[in-house]
Amino acid sequence: MIAEQRQLLQDPDKSDTYNRRVFAYYQQLMESKAKLTGSVKGRAGGTTGRFKEKTLSQLTAKHAVTVVQSFFAFYNLPISLRKFRKKDVRMQRPRIERKKHQLMGPEIGRLFDLADLRDKCVLALGLMGQDESTVAGLKVTDFEGKLDGVRLEFVELVRPKTNSEILLVLTPEVQAMLKTYVATVKGPWLFPGYKEKHVENGQPNKIFKALCAKAGLTDNGKRLSFHCCRLWFSAQLRNKVSDDLIDKMTGHQLRFNGAYMPEDEKLRQLLTDAGIIELLNLQGGQALGQEDLRKAAAIEGLLKRVEELERRLKEESE
């Protein structure tokens, strides 16, 4: 194919041959049905192994075409489908046929009611905007000094999926969960797995789906996955803080590489003033307000000064 394409490009009348073939391939994909094994659930909830015919989605078809284009581009033979996209709007603007489920407050409350301590922490970190691979690979040391529960805290991480920086925000409510859970963990990983490794990257998604099944949450045409937690986080903060801040806390690419992102103290004040603690209230309890946090921080500072004074007096007496 590579040799044929190079030869065809030398003839202006035939230079579009492979472009037309790839476009015809796309149209064929949109008309055909794929046989998916194990897609029919049995009475016990598992898969039967039977085949089920299903039409490919527009995004799947476009992805297949992109793979073919990438193959030719590797050999410096790019295939442009720009003029063909006008003939099929599905290629130009693929439609998402199965959108993700938008979690609601009562649904989140039901999930927490059914979850044990570990699963609550997995769920809470997802609802703080993190994806499953980031949650799976967290270490206990990531949270040292971040679980006092008197103010918003931030944990600087790197998102494995994109190698981008994340500023994980922890509300006092989430800090309290993690503090109780961390006391039960042995080893470096927050969520230990097999042979001294962390749990598999897909485990948070399995936990989420199992909790949804127990809570009676069904997809109803919209996908239920751990990513729904990230969607909820973004939706709660949308129009309350800037999109740049949301991108920073979810590990997406930032404009100017985050050069104009405020420092932690200014960011903490900005998010507190925006009411993020109330917006991210997970279990329906009474969230601490801004004034409550200020009082708690003042008490903490006073206790530290008292401890320092007692230490100095003890040193002088000795």
Image (spheres, rainbow, N blue to C red):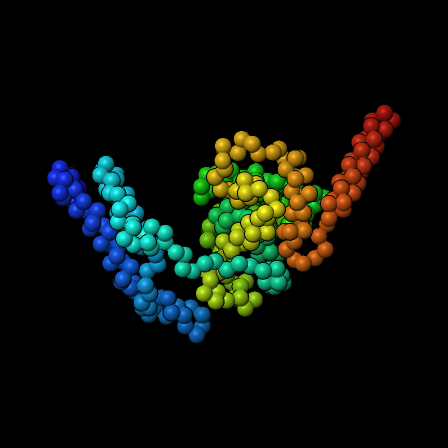
Q: Residue at x 51, y 63 (%)?
A: 210
Q: State the residue in front, 273 or 170.
A: 273
Q: Residue 215: which quarter of the image? A: bottom right
- Whether residue 112 is visible: no
Total labels: the figure holds: 0
Q: State the residue in front, 121 or 182.
A: 121
Q: Is residue 26 left or right of residue 170?
A: left
Q: Residue at x 41, y 70 (%)?
A: 41
Residue 38 rendering spot, x and y as whole percentages:
36, 66
Quadrant where the N terminus is found in the figure? top left
Q: Is residue 108 above or below residue 143?
A: below
Q: Is residue 312 left or right of residue 92?
A: right
Residue 262 rendering spot, x and y as whole percentages:
60, 34
Residue 308 rendering spot, x and y as whole percentages:
80, 31
Quadrant where the C terminus is found in the figure? top right
Q: Is residue 291 left or right of residue 80?
A: right
Residue 102 rendering spot, x and y as whole percentages:
53, 58
- Whether residue 92 is visible: yes
Q: Residue 99: which quarter of the image? A: bottom left
Q: Is residue 61 left or right of residue 160?
A: left
Q: Residue at x 14, y 40 (%)?
A: 12
Q: Residue at x 48, y 58 (%)?
A: 100
> Which residue appears farthest toward the bottom when viewing the image?
43
